[in-house]
């Protein structure tokens, strides 16, 4: 691995509570490289979301170092984020949401319409640019949120349970689309509760232990990334074996 | 918004019906002669008064020198100016209060203090400071109008959903970007609610503002008529003030809907 996209070294994080600090995460050492799709699973309270907040730069670790492309992370620089709720701006239409993101990314005004169209096309919503955000379905909203997060062409995409609120079918469709978001340059860190989702999406799964979250399992997922239909992949013996391994680790830390 | 049209028609009919019924009751009370006509003139008399006071060629230039429309224009100009400056001061102060907790801590008691004062109470002070020309009337309305806007704006800004702000920062927005593209649009509906309150306060204070050398306005007409027991003119003034107030409020409400169609949906 060349220079990692993300590097966590000796990271610990505590939240301030009234009487004593509550340890939320760590100590944790983790590296994520370009092309990796890292999915983090763990029980509630294992610090999955905290991990993403540290990597996105919204919080600093109590001890240890977090680096994104070699520097301390700054929100909005090199990193795109998709949250559990789409968090689209309702005062703007769908295209406007993406346009604003492009403006913040420094894309010149004259280039924006083309980029908006391309991004909407990429998430399969080419016809919905003029719609209001509340007029489209939850799954479509989350697609817009993904397009918006990709507007700045981030090297790293952080996704915090983005499909948790969606129905099963929409969820599977979006998983199939999101699976291809990694590239030579880009890495993804994805947090979920779902073991199936983790194994399907990941090139590597990390299971965090109960609070404070530590790495309980770091498992490469050597499933084919293309050429195999999603249903076939989900039904394969390899998939089932990996699924079993992750589920067992999760049961062990939750016990 | 097309699906809202049928729903809106019925309340309008209902309201027209309510006005008709109230007018009928009013007329019935007048016909029953519980009170002498000087105390309670009927709707027909008020209507006649409107026609008379609107006729600039009636020998007294409408009523006491100006027609109802002219008077309304004068008063609306005062309310317009007072509200406009009041809203401007209120929004700016409210934004600063909302963004800087220290400023809010210092300014909030003063704003609340001002809000508690009846406009007539500080009119005297404004007259001593600024004389009896147009300024103190407009200033009175500014002072009356800005506190509700400031309070609403400050509350709106502090109440902006942190999730939107965080999403914007995650997309690379700086402080100015967050303010212009998130905080202001997210606060707009509440700020406009403050504007509604402010214009209402300004409008209801216009009579107070016109107690001093304001005989040319609609409030001045009411005060003048009171002096001569012209009850129908007083009622005419009240109806005109109330109706225009209602129209202005409806217009602001429509603006609020147009600016923030997403209100209550996201």
Image: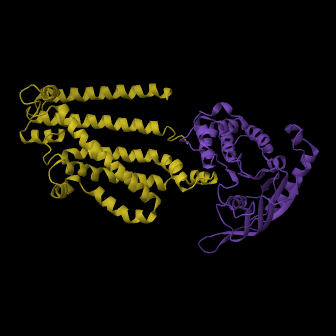
Chain colours: A purple, B yellow
Q: Residue at x 70, y 64 (%)?
A: A72
Q: Between A67 and A61, which is closer to the camera in this rendering?
A: A67
Q: Which image quarter: residue A207?
A: bottom right
Is residue B26 toward the left or the right of residue A167 in the image?
left
Q: Residue at (48%, 40%) from the top-left corner? A: B260
Residue B203 visible somewhere in the drawing:
no
- Where is residue B108? Give x, y as percent: 37, 61
Left or right, B209 with reference to B38: right
Tell me the residue at 29%/58% (across/down).
B114
**How far across and how far down the image is residue B14, in percent?**
35, 27
Quadrant holding the C terminus of chain B? top right
- Asked whether residue A106 is in view, the answer is yes
Most extreme residue toward the bottom is A19
As drawn, which residue projects farthest toward the right?
A: A237
Which percent across, then down, holds residue A81? Answer: 68, 51
Q: In the rendered picture of this protein, how many numbered marks are placed on residues?
A: 0
> What is the quadrant of residue B7 in the picture?
top left
Q: Position of residue A170 (x, y in %)?
A: 73, 38
């Amino acid at each position: 691995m060349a220079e990692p996209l993300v590097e966590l070294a000796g990271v610990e994080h505590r939240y301030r509570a009234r009487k004593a600090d509550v340890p939320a995460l760590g100590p944790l050492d983790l590296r994520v490289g370009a092309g990796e799709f890292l999915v983090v699973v763990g029980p509630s309270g294992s610090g999955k979301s905290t991990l993403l907040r540290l990597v996105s730069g919204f919080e600093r670790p109590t001890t240890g170092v977090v680096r994104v492309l070699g520097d301390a992370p700054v929100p909005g620089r090199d990193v795109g984020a998709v949250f559990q709720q789409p968090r689209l701006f309702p005062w703007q239409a769908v295209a406007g949401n993406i346009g604003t993101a492009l403006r913040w990314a420094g894309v010149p005004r004259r280039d924006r319409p083309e980029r908006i169209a391309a991004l909407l096309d990429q998430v399969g919503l080419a016809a919905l640019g003029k719609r209001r955000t509340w007029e489209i379905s939850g799954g479509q909203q989350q697609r817009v949120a993904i397009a918006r997060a990709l507007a700045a062409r981030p090297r790293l995409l952080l996704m915090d349970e983005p499909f948790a609120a969606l129905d099963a079918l929409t969820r599977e469709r979006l998983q199939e689309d999101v699976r291809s978001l990694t590239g030579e340059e880009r890495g993804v860190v994805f947090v979920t509760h779902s073991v199936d989702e983790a194994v399907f999406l990941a090139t590597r799964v990390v299971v965090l232990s109960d609070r404070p979250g530590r790495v309980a399992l770091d498992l490469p997922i050597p499933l084919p990334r293309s050429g195999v239909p999603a249903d076939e992949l989900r039904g394969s013996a390899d998939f089932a074996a990996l699924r079993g391994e992750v589920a067992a680790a999760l049961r062990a830390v939750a016990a | 918004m097309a699906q809202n049209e049928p729903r809106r028609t019925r309340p309008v009919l209902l309201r027209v019906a309510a006005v008709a019924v109230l007018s009928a009751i009013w007329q019935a009370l007048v016909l029953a002669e519980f009170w002498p006509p000087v105390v309670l003139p009927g709707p027909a008399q008020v209507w006649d008064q409107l026609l008379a006071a609107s006729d600039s060629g009636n020998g007294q230039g409408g009523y006491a020198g100006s027609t109802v429309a002219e008077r309304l224009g004068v008063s609306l100009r005062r309310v317009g100016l007072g509200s406009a400056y009041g809203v401007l001061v209120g929004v700016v102060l409210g934004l600063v209060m909302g963004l800087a907790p220290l400023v809010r801590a210092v300014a909030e008691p003063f704003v609340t203090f001002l809000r508690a004062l009846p406009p007539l109470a500080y009119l005297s002070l404004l007259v001593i400071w600024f004389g009896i020309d147009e300024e103190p009337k407009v200033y009175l309305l500014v002072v009356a109008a800005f506190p509700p806007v400031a309070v609403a704006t400050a509350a709106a800004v502090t109440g902006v959903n942190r999730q939107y702000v965080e999403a914007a920062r995650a997309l690379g927005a700086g402080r100015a970007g967050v303010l212009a593209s998130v905080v202001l649009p997210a606060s707009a509906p509440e700020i406009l609610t403050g504007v509604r309150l402010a214009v209402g306060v300004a409008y209801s204070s216009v009579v107070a503002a016109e107690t001093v050398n304001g005989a040319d306005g609609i409030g001045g007409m009411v005060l003048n008529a009171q002096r001569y027991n012209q009850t129908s003119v007083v009622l005419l003034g009240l109806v005109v003030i109330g109706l225009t107030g209602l129209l202005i409020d409806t217009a602001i409400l429509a603006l609020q809907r147009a600016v923030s169609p997403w209100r209550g949906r996201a």
